[in-house]
Image: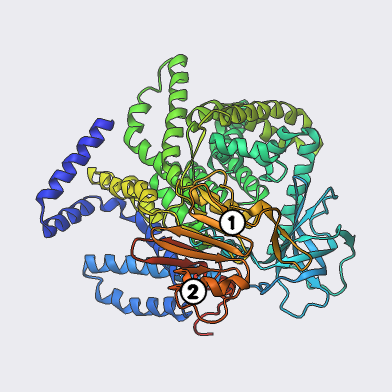
Amino acid sequence: MAGRIARGIGQGIAQAGRLTVPQAMLWLAAQALAERDRWALWAPVWFGLGIAIYFLLPAEPSAWWAMGALVLLAPLALLLKARPLGLLCLVVTALVVSGFGAAQWRANAVAAPVLKRETGPVWLEARVLNAQAQEGGLRLTLDRLQIERFTDPVPERVRVTVRGQVDVPAVGSWTRLRAMLSPPAAPAAPGAFDFARFAWFQQLGGVGFSVARPRPVEAPDGMATDGWQTSATLWLNGARQSLTRRILQAVPGPAGAVAAALMTGERSAIPPEVDAAYRDSGLAHILSISGLHLALVAGIVFTALRFLLALWERVALRYPIKKWAAVAALLATFAYMMLSGADVPTQRSFLMTGLVLLAVLVDRSAISMRSVAWAALAVLLLMPESLLNAGFQMSFAAVAALIAAYEVIGTRLSASGDRGIVVRAGLYLAGAAATTVIAGLATAPFAAFHFGRFVDFGLVANVLAVPLASLWIMPWGVLAFLLMPFGLERLALWPMGWGVEGLNLIAAKVASWPGAVSLIPAMPEWTLAAVALGGLWLCLWRRKWRLLGLVPLCFAAASPFLSPPPDLLIHPDGQMAVTLADGSLAIGGGAGIVAETWLRRAGERTASPWPGDRELVENKAGRLTRRGARAPAVSADGRLRCDVVGCTYRADGWMVALPRDTAATAEDCQSADLVLATVPVRGRCPAARLVVDRRDLNRDGAHAVWLGKNRIRVESVGAQRGRRLWTGAAPADQ
């Protein structure tokens, strides 16, 4: 197979080399025309392109852009109806504009107040929308907030972490607590995950932590009645909370926590070391309810009910029991999706499973690329922001790759259906291995881009774990659901727990192997576009020209080497980082989520020591002083030198000053090429080409600096994010 692919690529390159540009364009047009039956599969791609354009804009567009474009396209459709090529271009344009408009409408539809600044300790009363027990505490999602002595607009929802052992409040109850709230965090570095954008679409206007134990209170009088969506959310969250509690009572410990994740989607009770083992072994997808889980639930319900009805001869001979079983399986998967939280991968899986079951009802086959396309279009239409979600990208990439592979080799495998049990067992194991390899290859670029990691032994872990989950764990889970109304779920949860313990053992063992995870430095944003284009080109076309999709994939694979990491990073919280001569990252200013993000994006596990950091203490006046000797501390490579008032960094002929105290800025401005200060820099800096100080950090967030031979390049979070709704900007026409 590898030889055939290599020959195909070689022939394609040789043929492309002999063609002129017009000839190459005609050849591409001929290939596309020969596959016109696959054009419809590109509809969600063009729709998604419009969504991507909306999110990439540097400023919030006018609300009339998309509507005006669609109005202009209407008369063009009448003019071009007799010209197929023009009409095709018009359809593509309409899809792009529709995607843009859907994303813009969604972003405005979920608009809710967001905190502008940190509140300090405040007393608040609110309703518990969701409550999740965590290691060492509790995480509450609260709505209907009432904050004492608060004059700014009150957020629609906030998320508060409660530390310590506290009782989990019931969903829908009211609580009173004292908390420190702050706006959703901006990215820790240019190009990093934008939590504020994610929170905007969740209507989270603030996050924080409690400084006093919450206590239950009565609901205030005169509260407005909830809409049906909020009422349904409260009921589902309450049901999920109750089911999770019953599962944990029946199966305590890590096994029960994983069982709860598989049945209700509630992962907060999983110990951090167990969660890390699943992530490092390549089994994290088992904890995220998606295609595997819904397909198993549908298959178990469909097969079991059809088998039971077949035993009733009178019914089996007179009625369409196969269709009855399909309806029951559809209802079961819908209930499972809703109880598990209905995340994007779960929605995609339900749409795919639902299409398959509906095909059974109309005597058709629905496992095709067309069903994937319609499922993707439906998800993007309902939640355009899911295009940016790693779960959406990885979920659809895996399914599209599997179906594309099945289109190539499926007919050969189906010919072995009448062979013996030993051959069938071997084919099952081979199929499981092939599925793991194909899905792993399809999702690996997205995992590397979003999480900066590649799991090296995922094939081994999945070959061992997936049969265990499919043949033992999930059937007992379905039976536990059926027994819960009678209070007999323990009869099924106990054997399910035995299987989960085996699953945990596999994850821990594989994750402990040396080299189980390879860390990958952050990639530029164009990498994601190259991966998507190359993958779609490979999966959606059928002819040999599909191999052209390997070209952008090769560029994407090389992107970590084409884009060096920044030489310096600085954050408004006062943290700084520099790249040392050996490529490691030294971080000063303490640990935390910012330092973790910087390390992950640098592809490093631990930070190198910051010179003199351990010697610095605060004196009574709150200023930094140093214990012991007053000589400057120097990094091992000599690039970074630090004293009490700041540091200097030298690389590629540049001298960068990193003052910690305003007293050092005057001297730095006389000698440094670049000044990065966590304090205000007063006056002029005659020697510095560029100055970034406290005011710049407050306005534009974290900054990254690249030192070249002849120039300095600086990027900021604010410049990259632009003026968007989730950054506090209003639409252009408002």
Residue at 85% over, 50% down:
166
Query: Could you tell me residue 99's position as x and y percent?
Result: 43, 66
Q: Is residue 364 above or below residue 309?
A: below
- Res 290 seen here: yes
Query: Could you tell me residue 25's position as x and y percent?
Result: 17, 58
Kind of residue at disc 2: Gln
Closest to the observer: 692 or 571?
692
Q: Is residue 726 above or below residue 584?
A: below
Real-space Cα distance between discs 1 and 2?
20 Å
| Label disc, if present, on residue 670 of the rendered structure | 2
Residue at 42% over, 63% down:
654
Judge left or right: residue 58 versus residue 574.
left
Location of mark 1 (residue) = 632
Query: Could you tell me residue 351's position as x and y percent?
Result: 52, 49
Mark 1 neighbour class, 10 Å CA radius: few under 14, some 14 to 19, many 20 or more: some
Among the 4 quarters of the image, the one containing residue 194 = bottom right
Q: Is residue 389 above or below residue 220?
A: above
Among the 4 quarters of the image, the one containing residue 501 = top right
Which quadrant of the rendered structure holds the C terminus? bottom right
Number of labels in the image equals 2
Kind of residue at disc 1: Pro
Judge left or right: residue 25 versus residue 1.
left
Mark 1, secondary structure of its residue: loop
